[in-house]
Image (cartoon, helix red, strand yellow):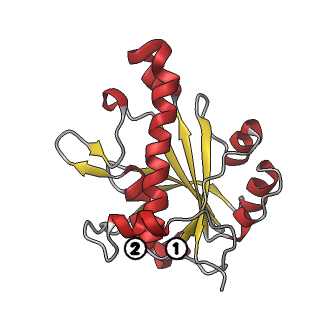
Amino acid sequence: MILLSLILYGTVSAKEIITLPLPKTIGEMSLEEALYHRRSEMAYDKADLNAKQVSQLLWATQGITEPTWQFRTAPSAGAVYPLEIYIVKPEGVYHYTPRSHSLELHLKGDKRPSLVRASLGQNFIGDAAVSIVITAVFDRTREKFGLRSERYVIMEAGHAAQNLLLQATAMGLGAVPVGSFWDDVVIATLDLPWGQDPLYIIPVGYLKQ
């Protein structure tokens, strides 16, 4: 498993922490073009994504853009950052760490079939190269903002998801935001820590020709 991860992504420690390549901050497609071309795509080729592609997608979702204050690509009420990001691949489930721009193996094995069942049989989730799952720890925001915390967290998840969708479009990939799933089954499938709630499943991959 470690050797496979090394081949796919680069540096891997004994703890199976994968350091991702640095993301690009200048792309080939303008923001206006990405906005114009973005569509919800649900027919995917099974071809895998490479390390640079995975790095770019995760950075767009929750990457660090200001090193001193650790600000991220998506705005967060009070800069609390309640979102946690997971990427589901055939080899396993990985947790994204923005501060180090790295992945840590969370679960071994292909959880995509279980994720399909958790999402009421939406088979395209199993066809895509990866699925990025956005979860939230509502208590982080609740401690600071009380009753308005739920609104702020859900808004933030929307910001992060749109970043991901536009980045995928700019990279010539397809993606679609999925909100229809059984929360408890997703939590069990991904073995999410207590207090984390899934908000989005976003499959990403090459479009089927």
What is the secondary structure assignment of the residue under circle 1? loop
Residue occupying the point 66% across, 75% down = 44
> Which of labels 2 and 1 is toward the front?
1
For the C terminus, the image quarter is bottom right
Q: Is residue 70 above or below residue 13?
A: above
Q: Is residue 13 visible?
A: no
* Residue 53 falls left or right of residue 188: left
For the N terminus, the image quarter is bottom right
Q: How many marks?
A: 2
Residue occupying the point 32% across, 77% down = 28
Residue occupying the point 56% across, 40% down = 135
Name the quadrant containing residue 207. Answer: bottom right
Q: Position of residue 184 (x, y in %)?
A: 75, 36
Three-letter amino acid code of the residue under disc 2: Lys
Q: Where is residue 16 in the image (x, y as percent from the top left)?
A: 49, 60
Name the quadrant containing residue 123. Answer: bottom right
Q: In this view, does 197 lie above or below 189?
A: above
Three-letter amino acid code of the residue under disc 1: Leu
On the image, numbered disc 1 is attached to which residue? 173
Q: Which mark is residue 52?
A: 2
Which residue reaches farthest top?
Answer: 146
